[in-house]
Structures are given as structure tokens and as C-alpha cells.
Amino acid sequence: MGKKVLAFDFGASSGRAMLGEYDGKEIRVTEIHRFSNDLVIVHGTMYWDILRLFHEIKQGILKAQAVAKIDAIGIDTWGVDFGMLDKNGELIGNPVNYRDERTVGMPEEVFRTIPESELYRLTGTQTMRINTLYQLYYLAHYRPELIERCDKILFTPDLMAYLLTGAVRAEETIASTSNFLDPVKKTFRTELLERLGIPSRILPPMIAPGEVYGTLTPALCEELGCAPIPVIAVCTHDTASAVLAAPTEQEMVYISCGTWSLFGTELPAPVITPESEKIQYTNEGGHSGTTRFLKNIMGLWLIQESRRQWKKEGFDVSFADLEREALEVEPYRCFIDCDAPEFAIAGDIPRRVQRFCEVTGQYVPKTRGEIMRCIYQSLAMKYRYNYEGLCSIAGRRYGQINMLGGGIKDTLLCRMTASSTGARVVAGPVEATVMGNIAEQLISLGELKDVSEARRVIAASTDLKIYEPTEHDEFVKHYDSFLAVLGRSGEEK
């Protein structure tokens, strides 16, 4: 058997350690450890419990060692967030969650110094208040004492690698979510930070996917009873790892489905044009220097948070229950703009859906099923909206969409996506992020030749499901109503 690697994949609500190996035909994946990722709110600020997560990493390494000799470790997480180190290498507080409200209004303040269009031309990044740039701007102007103490910032996966190895580096794909990376040169635009009063000295050196941060520190090796295992910089942004695992060698449109929906394509170079700026497509880093040209869409968060609210109210409903109830009601009665700011913050999403429909002059959904139907068909319509924009920029129609990640377990969303866009949907792998993480490690170790071989192997290792656009005409019939709602939503903001 070949080398065995350990992939840590962190999502917004949970994490897991997965053991991967290539047997010459397929990549085999075994879950070793799973744990929750619980937010901690203190005096109104929303934090990640980073030391608890580091404890879980150590537990994952211990459990993996009981199964096999580990040849490498890779870590991927969500984007934009970071921890701060002082000059002694100690953490300055807990990292703050991107959904925290401290960045409300920060983009508008930034644009007074650097106009939004100029910022897009320089970084090719979609404007989102959660981006690292706006978090740092807040700190520089409202918590300057923290910035003064800060020697270096580390994005979340880089921070975890630092806790394991002591290496201070910024991996390219996670750095590309910051809103201050040059997408062509893959270097930080330090002049942007300086113009905004953010000291560029806090930025660490870069590291590319496939390179090695370092090995586990001697203290950790003694604590865990293990050898100095190398920690490889995979595509540490979870979406970048998922796209690496897309089981195709053709030009593709992909949707990485999870808490967020990342809708885009893979390109050899960034696209920064007036057209891409108008539809707010972002240019993020991918494997081997490629560009993930994509749009961030509020994804299954809307369904997850709605279920959380109903459970809080005493209704023990499963996701399957919600899907069934959505199918039992009349379709196309109302829509929401999934990316409206009121849906980005934790809380009573069902009530916000009702309020949105009310203020935009639509039918107001009353039951759980009606609210869920509104969310589902709005997500599918938003996919169509971004699909049309992508095809327009590319000057071609894509006949197939690859849906990746845990969200493809939601078969109703997969079916609606095919019908809304009119494209054939190929769903899989469910474990796309983990597969991409493992594949990058195996390439770095010489077990796989390159990404092309990795994708062929992943395709052979995955049960893919096909969805045809069976109800395309119905979605087309109601698409103008959805577009009208987007227009009215903009007027309400």
C-alpha cells in the first residue's frame, strides 16, 4: 500500500480528520475523528474557539496513529478569518468569526479612501463585508491597541499549521480571500493596506500549495508520541480543495455546496473587466496557480439556520422533513435575494424571509413548507442568474455543472439547479474538499503525478449522480419574477 495522509477539514459548524491513501486505482478515505465547531459569543462578539480546535487536531493525530503510520498532514478551512500573533509568537485573543457584526459599515468607510471600482481593479475581489480587508480596517481604526501589539496575522489554516510547526506563512489560496492580494502576481498589495492605515508589517511570507510548512514541533512529537510528521500546505481554502477534486478534465462550471455556495469556473488567469465587476465575480487562487473565477452565494446556511430556529422553538424537524414539506406546497409564489444582508447574520431567518417578501410586495409565506420552498427555488434561481452572467463573460454556454461537497446530499437542490439553469448537473464527490486536500498531499509526496491524474483517480473513486433539467420551462416562466424581486431588493437596501 502507498503513503497515508491525514486531512483536517474544518467547516463553519464541524470538523473532521480523514485518513487517505491511494491504492493504485482509487483514493480510499476513512473518517478518524469528528467534532463540533462551536461559536463562542462573549459580550456580543462572536469568536472561533481556536484552542479547542487545536485540541481536536491533536486528538485526530493520536487516533490516526493508532490506525497507521502517518506520512503527512494537510489542513483546509473557511476563508477570510485570521488570528494575530505578538512579537513572542503568542495569540492575541481568539480569532473573531466573519459573521460578527463588527464589519457592518466598514466597506463604505474603506471606499471613502479607495473607491470600490479601484479596489476591484487591483484585487479582482467581490465586495463582501466579511473580507479580511474590512476586518483589519476595523481593527486599525477602532481597536488600534490590538494592531499595535500584532506582529503577524495568520489566516485560519495557516494559524493551525503554525500551532503544529511554528512556521509563519500565508498559503496562496487562503490569502486570495483577503481582498488585498494581487491575483496575477500572487503577492500582497501592501500599498492598499498602508493607504487604509493598516501596517503591512503584519503580513507573513507566502507559501504555495504543495510546499511544506514544516514538521511537527519537538514538543508536540513528545506529547503525541509521534515522529516529526510534515505539514503540507494543501489548497488550504476549502473551496480551492473542493475544486481540485472536481472529477472532470473538461472546462467546467462548478458549485461547491455547503454553508456557502461557490459558483464559478476554473481559469488559467484572472478576469478583471467592467463586466466581471458589474456582476461581482471574484478571482481567487487555485491549485498550480490557476484562478477560481467565482461568485459567493449565501448557500445552505439559509436552510441550516432556519432549521436551527425552528428547533429552538420546539419543532424537532430534520432536513428531510423540511424538503418534504417544501415539495407539498404551491411553487413559485415568492422569492428572496439570498445575498441580501439581512440573511447573513445568525438569527430568525424564517421571519426575515417573511419580512423580505412583505416589503418587496410578494405573497408572504406562512408555513414551514412555504418558507422552505421560497428558499430552495430562490437559491436555484440565483444559480441561474450567476450561470447566465458567467456564460455572458465567457462568451459560451456550458452544458454541464459539477456540484461538489456535502450540499449535494440535498437532492431537491440538485434537481432544481438542473431545471433552473437548463444544464446537466453532475453531483459528486460529496467529500470533495477532503478529496482535494488528500490529493494535494499525495501529489506533494509523489504518489500522484499531477492534478490531471488526481482528478482521473477521484472520478474512479466516486459514485457520481446525474440530474437532467426536467422542469426547465417552469423555471424560465418565472425567472422574470425573480429578477424583479432582485431589483426591488436593491431599492429596499
Image (tube, rainbow, N blue to C red):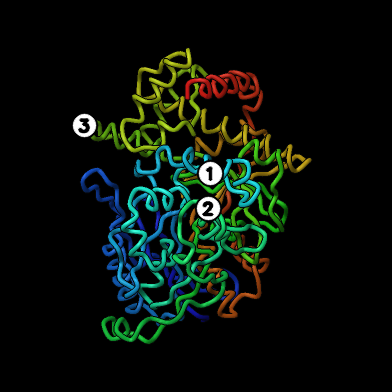
Q: Residue at x 43, y 26 (%)?
A: 326
Q: Are marks 3 and 1 in contact (CB under 8 Å)?
A: no
x and y, in percent, of residue 435 in the image: 52, 63
Q: Which residue is mark 1?
A: 113
Q: Are marks 1 and 2 in contact (CB under 8 Å)?
A: yes
Q: How many C-alpha atoms fall within 10 Å of the one at disc 2: few (<14), some, or many (≥20)?
A: few
Q: How many C-alpha atoms fall within 10 Å of the one at disc 3: few (<14), some, or many (≥20)?
A: few
- Cα distance between the residues tagged 1 and 2: 8 Å
x and y, in percent, of residue 183 in the image: 63, 57
Give the SS element for disc 3.
loop
Q: Residue at x 66, y 40 (%)?
A: 424
Labels 3, 1: front one: 1
Q: Which residue is mark 3?
A: 314
Give the SS element for disc 2.
helix
Q: Residue flagged by tag 2: what amino acid is it?
A: Arg
Which badge, 3 or 2, is on the more N-terminal residue?
2
Which badge, 3 or 1, is on the more N-terminal residue?
1
- Cα distance between the residues tagged 3 and 1: 48 Å
Q: Is residue 462 visible to the viewer in this orientation of the structure? A: no
Asked whether 338 or 245 is in front, the reply is: 338
Q: Residue flagged by tag 3: what amino acid is it?
A: Gly
Q: Vertical placement of 398 versus 35: above or below?
A: above
Q: Is residue 218 toward the left or the right of residue 363 in the image?
A: left
Q: Which residue is mark 2?
A: 195
Asked whether 79 or 32 is in front, the reply is: 79
